[in-house]
Image: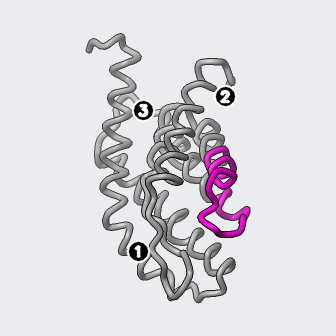
Amino acid sequence: MKLDAKLAANVGVLTAVSIVLTRFFGVIVPIAGANALRLSFGEAPIMLAGVLFGPAGGALAGVAADLVGFLINSFGGPYHPGLTLSMGLTGLIPGLLLHSKRNELTVLQVGLIVLLTDLITGVLLNTLWLSQMFGGGFFELLGMRLVARLLTVPLYTVTVYWASRAYRFYLAGGSR
């Protein structure tokens, strides 16, 4: 990945959108007395960064969004490097699997990669990190986190698919 001004600006914008969606429009749902479930749409711009700008661009957007976002609003919780790793992977995985196909994506392709990414990062890894942070049991947290994915996965899929098509349209000068 060659980091030029255009790439930095685009990744920066998606990082900023992720921070706003996560830190200002996210909702915390307590589980077993811990702030273990955050409903937000901040992961979608990170996945989009990976699809549009490759695995390194997606990982950079994810790590930056987590670190800067934590400094802006930690939601009262401690910092955990595992959550930063998860956000990096949230951009890296779609970048690895979809970046080369970004000009001919189907909704099914995007949906499967969003599902895979969210199961690895949002469900498995983040549940592990949160159980470590708050001392709750992994399986106590897992159920509600899986239920939340019934809402987030379809919305992330539509958002990433639509935004990638809109960006491609924009790059083509607004014409097909």
Q: Is label 2 in contact with label 3 (beta carbons under 8 Å)?
A: no
State the residue position of label 3. Answer: 102
Q: Mark 1: few, some, or many residues within 10 Å (few <14, many ≥20)?
A: some
**Quadrant of the image for the C terminus?**
top left
State the residue position of label 2. Answer: 1
Q: Give the magenta part as a residue range.
A: 64-85
Camera-side residue of 124 and 148: 148
Lower position in the chain sequence, tag 2 or tag 1: 2
Whether 96 is among the magenta residues is: no
Lower position in the chain sequence, tag 3 or tag 1: 3
Q: Residue at x 42, y 82 (%)?
A: 143
Q: Say which amino acid is labelled 2.
A: Met
Camera-side residue of 45 and 125: 45
From what the image shows, is residue 79 above or below residue 176?
below
State the residue position of label 1. Answer: 146
Q: Can the viewer see residue 176?
A: yes
Residue 84 in picture, x, y percent from top left: 67, 57
Q: Residue at x 52, y 36 (%)?
A: 14
Q: Mark 2: few, some, or many residues within 10 Å (few <14, many ≥20)?
A: few
Q: Residue at x 49, y 40 (%)?
A: 17
